[in-house]
Image (cartoon, rainbow, N blue to C red):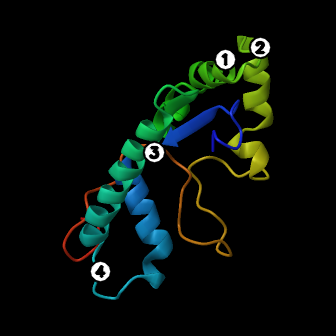
């Protein structure tokens, strides 16, 4: 990327691997081999997840690169967005960051759906748009306990 755009700044948003594995398993389950359990999928996902993070860090060494945890964005949106705005060279004062967060809030962008509510039936999965630990660990059968 930097060979094409040498002045580029790269923001890597990293989601907790456990949450990512559960979400991806739910989303892609119909495309997986029928015998693949949620636990098998989580193991495979974890290997790819950690490799992608290591690769990004290796490639980005010494270049304009920042990581932000997805969960940290939810826990402290003003602080984390301010940190990102500063990294990107944008105005990072609380008033500007607050206005940007309000304009790009989940509720605004989803057409009024409240965070944590289920998506309408016509969309994929049963995601609830909530960051945080998965409800329960996967089991051999692929079902949460």
**Residue assigned mark 2:** 95
User: Marks 3 and 2, Cα distance to the nearest angstrom?
Assistant: 27 Å
| Residue 6 % position (x, y) | 68, 33
> Does label 1 or label 2 sit earlier along the sequence?
1
Q: Which label sits in the foreground, 3 or 2?
A: 3
**Residue assigned mark 3:** 15
Mark drawn on residue 36: 4
Residue farthest bottom in this picture: 34
Q: Which label sits in the foreground, 1 or 3?
A: 1
> Does label 4 or label 2 sit earlier along the sequence?
4
Determine the secondary structure under disc 2: helix
User: Marks 1 and 2, Cα distance to the nearest angstrom?
Assistant: 14 Å
User: Marks 4 and 3, Cα distance to the nearest angstrom?
Assistant: 23 Å
Mark drawn on residue 86: 1
| Residue 67 % position (x, y) | 50, 32
Q: Measuring 50% from the left and 70% from the top, which residue is drawn there?
A: 27
| Residue 129 % position (x, y) | 56, 52
> Does label 4 or label 3 sit earlier along the sequence?
3
> Compared with residue 52, is residue 141 higher up or lower down, i.e. above or below?
below
> Does label 1 or label 3 sit earlier along the sequence?
3
């Amino acid at each position: 990327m930097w060979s094409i755009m040498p002045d580029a700044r790269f923001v890597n948003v990293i989601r907790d691997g456990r949450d990512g594995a559960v979400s991806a398993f739910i989303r892609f389950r119909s495309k997986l081999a029928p015998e693949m359990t949620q636990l098998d999928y989580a193991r495979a996902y974890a290997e790819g997840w950690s490799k992608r993070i290591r690769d990004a860090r290796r490639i980005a060494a010494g270049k304009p690169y920042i990581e932000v945890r997805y969960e940290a964005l939810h826990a402290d949106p003003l602080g984390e967005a301010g940190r990102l705005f500063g990294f990107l060279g944008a105005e990072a004062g609380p008033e500007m960051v607050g206005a940007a967060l309000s304009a790009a809030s989940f509720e605004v962008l989803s057409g009024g759906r409240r965070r944590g509510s289920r998506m309408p039936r016509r969309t994929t999965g049963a995601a609830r748009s909530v960051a945080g630990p998965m409800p329960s660990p996967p089991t051999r059968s692929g079902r949460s306990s």
